[in-house]
Each structure stands twice: as C-alpha cells, then as structure tokens.
Image (cartoon, rainbow, N blue to C red):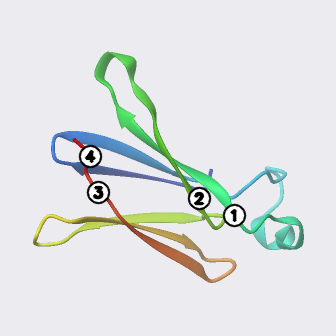
Amino acid sequence: MYDWEAFRVGDDYYLLAAVYGDLDPHRSPSTTSTTLATSTSSVIYRWQGVEKFVVAHRLSTPPATDWETFTTERGDVFLVCANGHAGISQLFRVKLVQ
C-alpha cells in the first residue's frame, strides 16, 4: 500500500487504499515498472462500527501511488487515483446506491 485516504459520503465513513500491485515490498516502483501489471484493484473499505472497516468495493485502477478525494458545492464526491511514477491518473464519481 502506498497511500490511505479517508472520506465521508453522507453519514458513512470510508477508507481508500492505493494498491500498487504485487511487488517486492523492498523495491521502489520505479525499479520494477517493467514487470508491473497495467491494472490492479484498489480497495474501498466502509466503517461498520463494531465490525471495524470492511471491504465495500474494489476498483480496477492503474497501479496507484496516491488517492485524493474532493466534494463539490453540489455535494458530489470524486475520487482521484494517481500513479506519480508512470504519470497515469483516473477520476471516479461516487454514486450512492440506496
């Protein structure tokens, strides 16, 4: 894991994990970029109170080194996935399902 990002949607709290891929943890991403897959699964965890954080969703993303979140004035929540080593990013809009 390279980054954790906490965010809130309504009354729910989430934690987002930036997953770079199945790499040797002792190597930096720049030294292993030739063996790295082009996508991985970043994980969104939802706070469940007594149960702690549980997996809520997996997103297919490029290998991620950073996540950022922001909320617009209208209340829309966006997640930005970035890989600073490869110059790749993705933008996701959170959609509430009730």
Q: Tell me whether the residue at label 3 lies in contact with that at label 4, contact meaning CB atoms closer than 8 angstroms.
A: yes
List x then y, in percent, for residue 31.
86, 70
| Residue 95, label in figure | 3
Q: Residue 62's image quarter?
A: bottom right
Task: Name the amino acid, label 4.
Answer: Val
Circle 2 residue: 60
Residue 94: x, y in percent? 32, 59
Q: Amino acid at mark 2?
A: Ser
- Mark 3: which secondary structure? loop
Disc 1 to disc 4, how far (Cα)?
26 Å
Q: CA distance from mark 1 to mark 3?
A: 22 Å
Q: Secondary structure at mark 4?
A: loop
Is the Cβ of the residue at disc 2 closer than 8 Å to that at disc 3? Answer: no
Q: What is the CA distance from the residue labelled 2 to the residue labelled 3? A: 16 Å
Q: Which residue is farthest front? A: 98
Q: Earlier in the sequence, mark 2 or mark 4?
A: 2
| Local SS, label 2 | strand
Q: Residue at x 69, y 80 (%)?
A: 86
Q: Residue at x 32, y 26 (%)?
A: 48
Amino acid bearing label 1: Ser
The residue carrying mark 1 is 39
User: In the rendered structure, which disc, 1 or 3, sits on the residue that comes first in sequence?
Assistant: 1
Q: Disc 3 residue type?
A: Lys
Q: CA distance from mark 2 to mark 4?
A: 19 Å
The residue that mark 4 highlights is 97
